Each structure stands twice: as C-alpha cells, then as structure tokens.
Amino acid sequence: MDIKVPLSRPDITEAEIEAVTDVLRTPNLSLGPKLREFEKAFCDYIGCNYAVAVNSGTSGLFLCLSAMGIGPGDEVITTPFTFIATSNVILMVGAKPVFVDIDPVTLNIDPVKMEKAITPRTKAIIPVEVFGSPAGFDAICEIARKHNLLIVEDSCEGLGSMLHGKKAGTFGDMSVFAFYPNKQMTTGEGGMILTDNKHWADLCCSLRSQGRSIGGGWLAHERLGYNYRLCDINCVLGIVQLSRIEEFVEKRRAVAQMYQQLLSDDSRIIVPTEPDGCRMSWFVFVIQLPGYNQDKRNTTMKKLVERGIQVSNYFPPVHLQPFMIQQFGFKSGDFPLTESVSQRTIALPFHNNLSADEVKTVCNELKACLE
C-alpha cells in the first residue's frame, strides 16, 4: 500500500550528517567529549545544574526512581493516558503504580483527583506532558510540595513547551526527555535526565554505566548498574538537533495552526488547541471524534490508511493493557475519562516539514472518511 503522507519523519540536515561523520572519523565513539558537550548543552537550554544522557526516555525514568530510592512498598501516582513506559518504570523498581484519571480538556492528570489518591505509601508523582502540554503542572507541583512528595517529570513529549514562561523539564525534582525519531528532536534513540540534585545525578551516572563510581576505574563497580549509556554518535546528533530546537518548535506550531484552520469548522471533530498560558511544542496532533466508539474510530483509521494516510491511536489506556489487568485486576470503567478519550482519538500525520498541500490532503481525506 502506497503511503501518501507518513505519520512522522525526523528533520535531518547536512549539518547533522556532517557532525555524525566527523565523530566517526575519531576514536571517541562512546564516553567521549560529545557526551559531556550534549549534557552541558541541555543544562544550558533547560536551565538546570546537571544532565545525564541515557539510551532512552524509559531508561531515564527508571534511573530517576532508582536514584530517589523508590522501591517495593512504595506507591507512585501517574496517569493511565500515556505511553506504557511511564508505568513500566514504576514496576521495574518494584513499586506500585497508582493511576489517576485525566482532565477532559488538558488530557493531563487531574490535580484534584490526584490529591485524593495520595496515601501514606505515596512517595512520588510522575506527571506526563501529554502530547507536549504542561497544562496543570503548576497545580501538580503545589500539591506535591504540600504533601512532601517527589516529582519525576515525564517530559518525553514536552521538549520546547512552556507554562507561563516556565520550561517543560523544570517542574520536577528530576525530569526526563526522550529523543525517538518522532519526537521534537532526535538522537535516533536516546534520553536525557535533568536535575539540580548532585547526589541523584551522580547516582544516575553510575547506574547508567554498570555501577561504576565517579572517577573510579573501568573494572571497579560500586553498585549494581546497567548499560544505559548514549554513545557519542547519538550525542553529536543531539547537539545539532538541540541547537535547532526553537526552529523545530516554530515549524511544529505552524503545522498545528494549518490543521486548526482547516478542521476547526467541522463539528464532527474536536481539534486540539494550545491551553491558556502554554507554549506547545506539539509532539503529535491528536484529534477526537465525539460520539465515536473504539470500533467506529478504528474503521475510520483503516479507511485513512487505505487512502495512504498514516494515522495512529494515541493512547490506548495503560490500565487495560493485558499484563496490567492480569497483575492488578483493572477493568473497563475504572478510569472513564481516559477510556472515553482513548476510544475516539486519532493522531494525524505530523512532523516539522509537513507541507501545506500534505496537510490539506490529510484534512480532505479525513473529512471524506467521517460519517
């Protein structure tokens, strides 16, 4: 089947290609100078003291919880409307994920319901900037401070976004970005941990590299660790991409505005907009089809794919994934807003360089597929 408009595509120029080939001409393919340069560039951009590059956002979230000492017997509050990694890392450290339903407008975790879910076992919150929106994160932080809870900010979809001028990645005690090719910027695979806490940063550096101590020998292992390193090839790609982040944000906002202009007058479609006080960097562009159930939505997606338009269903509810049901006994109806939204969402093709003609094609095909 021919694809007329792909779901996503990275924005790679000759600058990135040249930078990568330059590294390939050196002997420093891993643990070289580009690792430290990439970490410093992120500190400078986000405005924090410490950055730790890792091989994925998932690894980053896991190391944050590990560095904070969260484990068996602890509860961590998060949203069921997210990518599976957010909850997986809670299970990976032996803690229990406690899901809280979403705000129907922002699609982020509902702060009021979140506070009601806090128990004596609650140790941390992992709020997610769903689709790149930090809406409600000021309220989340206020509640966390009130209850003396740690925040691991899942910014894997939020690079470049702001709330009232405060950047995504600066709300949590620790935060994590991810660089898969469909993200705002990419390193192929990769992630970045940000924090102002030196002890946690040092622990993450050790844990990402087989438990080696800072300044210790290559075969000296202070603790159980992992191989979550990001090589210099990935890092130099990230350095160039990060230098272009404001260009990327503006490109993505322009594509989102084209969709909004072409779809906002159609009553069959709920079109996403920037929340008040937010600058969205737009990870994806996800519409909702009011009145649709999952089968009807899926039929529409199938029709679009048959017409050469790649689409996806962001996000299936995490609590209804088979292993979650098996382990915790979750069932349909546990988080009704998440389930309702999940059944009627469609992620449309979205990337930095999506053309006006491609956006028009997507919108025309979408409208033709709707009843």
Image (cartoon, rainbow, N blue to C red):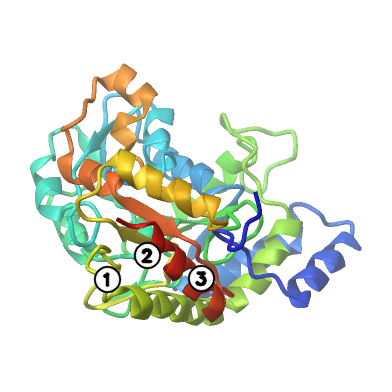
Query: Looking at the rendered structure, which numbered label has been put on residue 361?
Result: 3
What residue is pinned by disc 1?
Answer: 266
Estimate the x, y position of residue 68 in percent, counting from the top left. Answer: 38, 42
Amino acid tagged 3: Thr
Whether residues under marks 2 and 3 lie with C-beta atoms below 8 angstroms apart, the answer is no
Q: Residue at x 11, y 47 (%)?
A: 113
Q: Nearer the viewer, residue 118 or 314?
A: 314
Q: Is residue 141 left or right of residue 366?
A: left
Q: Secondary structure at mark 2?
A: helix
For marks 2 and 3, the one nearer the N-term is 3
Estimate the x, y position of residue 271 in percent, counting from the top left. Answer: 29, 68
What residue is pinned by disc 2?
Answer: 367
Estimate the x, y position of residue 226 in percent, counting from the top left. Answer: 61, 34
When asked about the image quadrant of residue 260, the answer is: bottom left
Q: Is residue 311 left or right of residue 299?
A: right
Badge 2 crowding class, 10 Å Cα cut-off, few under 14, some 14 to 19, many 20 or more, is: some
Estimate the x, y position of residue 148 in percent, counting from the top left. Answer: 18, 49
For marks 1 and 3, the one nearer the N-term is 1
| C-alpha span from label 2 to label 1 | 8 Å
| C-alpha span from label 1 to label 3 | 16 Å
Q: Nearer the viewer, residue 151 or 363?
A: 363
